[in-house]
């Protein structure tokens, strides 16, 4: 009987213990500038998603931390995450088209993506068929660029493809493009960054909510994904993720 108790105790200990650090590969961890989720400030990578990931790395016993995260233009990071093993990319929209390109941990949050126009233009979009007459600012390889190219009759020459949201907001404000494809938070944040009021633009079309996640190279072992997901779920259950969101909203 005593032997059985010892065996059961050992099994419980193994299940509840994070995977050993020597089983965790060293990841290339990449993100982009996208406040308040991931951004560079005071020589550190910060943000909601960043802080969550740092807690997960610590919880599973990884030796990596905030200093191992690198910021790149989205197009470069997105392409590298598909071709380089042991890569984590965030914050990444999970869509049907991307489902099999990566393995996923999350969702961190859901966000609505829209098309935005300057109010003075009085642009009305009733359906995607109306988009053909407009020049639309997108980020290269961003989820909205993918949606626009796969779910509408738009051609690439309808898109003004750039590497940052700041560029798109500048172009929209100066009437160099007609629409910008992004989220409300991004439009507000980039307007603040450019010292513009936030009442000059308006939402003219919605693509609905998308789930935002940590994306892993598709060959990442399942036990790694399961460990990351378990750590994420625990952080969510004990309220630490909610605390991080509240910190960046104040």
Image: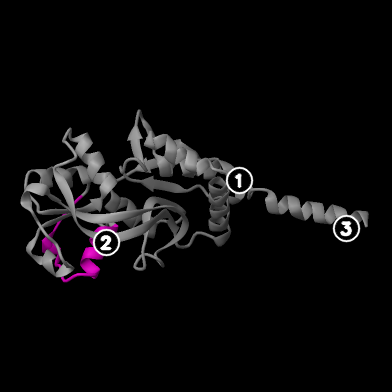
- Comparing 166 with 14, the one in front is 166
Q: Is residue 76 above or below residue 69?
A: below
How dense is the environment of label 2, judged by Cα within 10 Å: few (below 14), some, or many (20 and up)? some
C-alpha gap between disc 1 and disc 2: 41 Å
Residue at 53% of width from left, 41% of height from top? 240
In the rendering, at what x and y percent does residue 57 appear?
53, 44
Circles 1, 3 touching at the beta carbon (< 8 Å): no
Q: Using the image, determine if residue 56 lies above or below residue 218.
A: above
State which region is magenta: 143-162
**How many labels were placed on the picture?**
3
Tag 1, which secondary structure? helix
Which of the two marks, 1 or 2, is nearer to us in this view?
2
Read off the residue under disc 3. Answer: 4
Q: Name, please, the residue furthest toward the top.
A: 42
Mark 3: secondary structure: helix
Provide the residue designation for mark 1.
21
Q: Is residue 151 magenta?
A: yes
Give the labeled residue for mark 2. 207
Q: 169 and 123: which one is in front?
A: 123
């Amino acid at each position: 009987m005593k032997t059985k108790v010892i065996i059961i105790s050992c099994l419980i200990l193994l299940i509840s213990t994070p995977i050993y650090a020597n089983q965790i590969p060293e990841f290339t961890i990449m993100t982009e500038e996208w406040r308040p989720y991931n951004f560079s400030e005071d020589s550190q990578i910060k943000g909601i998603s960043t802080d969550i990931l740092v807690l997960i790395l610590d919880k599973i016993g990884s030796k990596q931390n905030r200093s191992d995260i690198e910021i790149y233009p989205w197009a470069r990071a997105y392409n590298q995450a598909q071709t380089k093993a042991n890569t984590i990319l965030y914050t990444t929209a999970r869509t049907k088209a991307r489902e099999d390109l990566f393995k996923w941990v999350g969702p961190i949050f859901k966000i609505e993506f829209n098309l935005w126009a300057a109010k003075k233009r009085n642009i009305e979009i009733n359906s995607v068929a109306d988009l053909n007459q407009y020049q639309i600012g997108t980020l290269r390889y961003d989820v909205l660029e993918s949606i626009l190219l796969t779910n509408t009759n738009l051609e690439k020459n309808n898109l003004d493809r750039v590497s940052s949201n700041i560029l798109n907001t500048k172009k929209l404000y100066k009437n160099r493009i007609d629409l910008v494809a992004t989220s409300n938070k991004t439009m507000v944040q980039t307007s603040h960054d450019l010292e513009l009021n936030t009442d000059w633009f308006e939402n003219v079309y919605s693509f609905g909510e998308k789930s935002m996640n940590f994306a892993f190279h598709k060959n990442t072992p399942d036990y790694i994904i399961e460990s990351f997901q378990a750590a994420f779920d625990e952080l969510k259950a004990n309220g630490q993720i909610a605390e991080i969101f509240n910190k960046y909203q104040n």
